[in-house]
Image: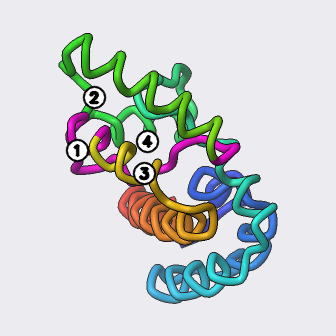
Amino acid sequence: MELSEADLRACCASRRWVAAVAGHRDLDALRAASRRALDELEWADVEEALAAHPRIGDRVGGGAREAGWSRGEQSGMDGAATGLRDALVEGNRAYEERFGHVFLIRASGRSALEMLADLRRRLGNDAETERQVVRRELAEIVDLRLAKLAEEGA
């Protein structure tokens, strides 16, 4: 599996992560390198990755690989009632005010209601606990995206 920097950045926008995993061609080795690199990222590197993620409920336009993945990952929002969407908008706003970055959750396989419940629960976290949760969610998202790259034969 030959991966370009653009392929890797679609999985995780942290330049430090991309540099750490570049050159791995086997999916298992790439996943292992990814886990190590994510564990070692400074918080600023995590924030760089977060900046590339849309808010839950925002529909990303465009034909880029990452935009398409994001739309698919957030398919649990499809058909969500207006009240639920409004609650997510308010929750996103409260979360960003509290923690200073986008609410990150592995949306794949989760309904809008599940994501809202998790957002509300996480608003009660202290900053350090929330950073740990964000790192876990980011690792799950990156791992899913690496698997998608492998499926696509990138």
Residue matched to label 2 = 77
- For marks 4 and 2, give the one nearer the viewer: 2
- For marks 4 and 1, give the one nearer the viewer: 1
Q: Nearer the viewer, residue 20 or 91?
A: 91
Residue in view at x 65 percent, y 35 percent = 97
Residue 133 horizontal side relative to residue 115, left or right: right
For marks 2 and 1, give the CA distance: 10 Å
Residue matched to label 3 = 105
On residue 114, the disc is 1
**First in sequence: mark 3 vs mark 4:** 4
Residue in view at x 42 percent, y 51 percent = 105
Q: Give how far across and how far down residue 41 sits, in percent.
A: 73, 75
Q: Nearer the viewer, residue 152 or 114?
A: 114
Name the amino acid, label 3.
Answer: Ile
Up-down relation of residue 31 to residue 86 (above or below): below
Q: Nearer the viewer, residue 121 or 70?
A: 121
Name the amino acid, label 2.
Answer: Met
Circle 2/circle 1 CB separation < 8 Å: no
Q: Nearer the viewer, residue 113 or 97?
A: 97
Q: Secondary structure at mark 1?
A: helix
Residue matched to label 4 = 69
Residue 17 horizontal side relative to residue 102, left or right: right
For marks 4 and 2, give the CA distance: 14 Å
- Judged by its main secondary structure, the magenta piece is loop
Residue in view at x 44 percent, y 34 percent = 56
Name the amino acid, label 4.
Answer: Trp
